[in-house]
Amino acid sequence: MKNNKLIVFEALKWASSFLNESGREENVAEIAMRFVLKMERAQVLANLRKELTIEEYLQFEKLIFQHAEGVPIQYLIGYEEFYGRKFLVNPSVLIPRPETEELVYGTLNRIKQRFTDRKKPLDVVDVGTGSGAIAISLKLEAPSLNITASDISPKALETAIKNAEGLGADIHFVQGDLLTPFIGNKRFDCIVSNPPYIPILDKESLSTVVKDYEPETALFAGLDGLDCYRKIIGQLQQVIKEEALVAFEIGYDQGDAVKQLIKNQFPLAEVEVVQDINGKDRMVYAYIK
C-alpha cells in the first residue's frame, strides 16, 4: 500500500483501474467511497484531496476487493438508491435498477391520465415486490393510493416491510405467488409488476455479479422468460375492477410477446410498449375497460 493511496483522489484512481482490469464497473469505486466516508457524491468530489485514515482506507480496499470477486456492492453496503431514496437490500431481494424508476414514473403518469374522474382512492398492487421499491415509491409519490404488495418469498417481504417502515410508507403486504392470494378476495384498479423475465438459458451469459448473488427466483422465468407474464395475465380477470391499468417491466426483446399475451386475453385492451432511456423496449402498459 502506497501512502498516496490514502488521498481520496488516489484511492479512487487505484480502485477504478483495478475494477476495470477485473471486468467490473468503475463507478463502484465512488459508491464505496461515499459509503466509507458517509458522504454524498458532491461532498466526495469536494474532498478529493482529503487524507483517509488507515481504517477508512482498509475498509474501502476490502469493499473493492470483494466487489472485484463478484459480490454486488449494494449487498456489501446494504442499500441501493431508488427514486431518490435509500432502500435496504440483501441477497434475498433483487437490487432495484434505474430502469424500474421509469416504470414507477410511467405508472404514476398513467394513473393520473386514466383515473381523473375517480373520487375514491385507487387500489394498486405491486406483484413480486422484492425490496418494496416500486410499491413504496408509488405510495410516497402519490399518498392517496391504497397500495398492496405481494411476494412469494417471506425473506423478501421482511426486507420490504423494513423499507416501508423506515421510509414511512403505509403498505399492506401479502405473502403468496403472484396474484393468487387476491383471487376471490380483492380487486384492483392498477396492477404493476417487475416480475422475473430472464430466460433460464441466458443464465450463463449473465455477469457473475448477477447470476451468482441475486436470487434466482427474482431473475428467471422459464425457457422464454415469459412464464410470470402468462400467469399474471391469466389471473387478471379475477382481480381487476371494471376499469384497470396494468404496468409491466419487460426484457428488451419481449415487448411484442407480452403485448400479444395481453391482447389474447383482452382483445379490446389499449396496449403500449414503451422504451427506456436507452432506447430499449422496457415497459408494457395496458388499459383494460
Image (tube, grey):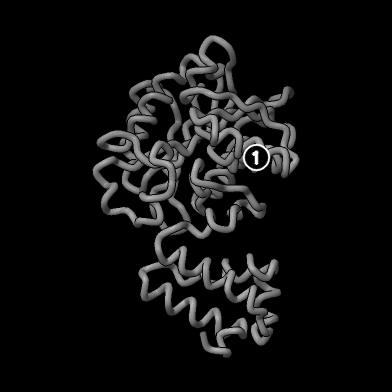
Horizontal side of residue 227 vs 268, given as left or right: left
The residue at 38%/40% (across/down) is 216
Placement of 193 over or under 239, stated as above or below: below
Q: Quadrant of residue 258?
A: top left
**Residue where numbered disc 1 is placed:** 136
Give percent across and percent down for residue 11: 55, 81
- Left/right placement of residue 276 relative to residue 43 reads left
Where is residue 250? Give x, y as percent.
40, 42
Residue drawn 43% across and 79% down?
17
Q: Please tell me which residue lies in front, 210 or 104.
A: 210
Of residues 133 and 282, the one nearer the viewer is 133
SS state under label 1? helix
Rendered image quadrant of residue 110: top right
Q: How many marks?
A: 1
Q: Residue at x 37, y 45 (%)?
A: 251
Q: Can you name the residue that lies furthest to the top here?
A: 184
Residue 96: percent from left, percent from top: 53, 49
Residue 284 visible in the current orientation? yes
Estimate the x, y position of residue 78 in percent, counting from the top left. Answer: 59, 53
Q: Is residue 113 visible in the rendered structure shown here?
A: no
Left or right relative to 203: residue 195: right
Seen from the viewer's position, the closer of residues 104 and 85 is: 85
What amino acid is labelled 1 in the image?
Ile
How dense is the environment of label 1, judged by Cα within 10 Å: few (below 14), some, or many (20 and up)? many
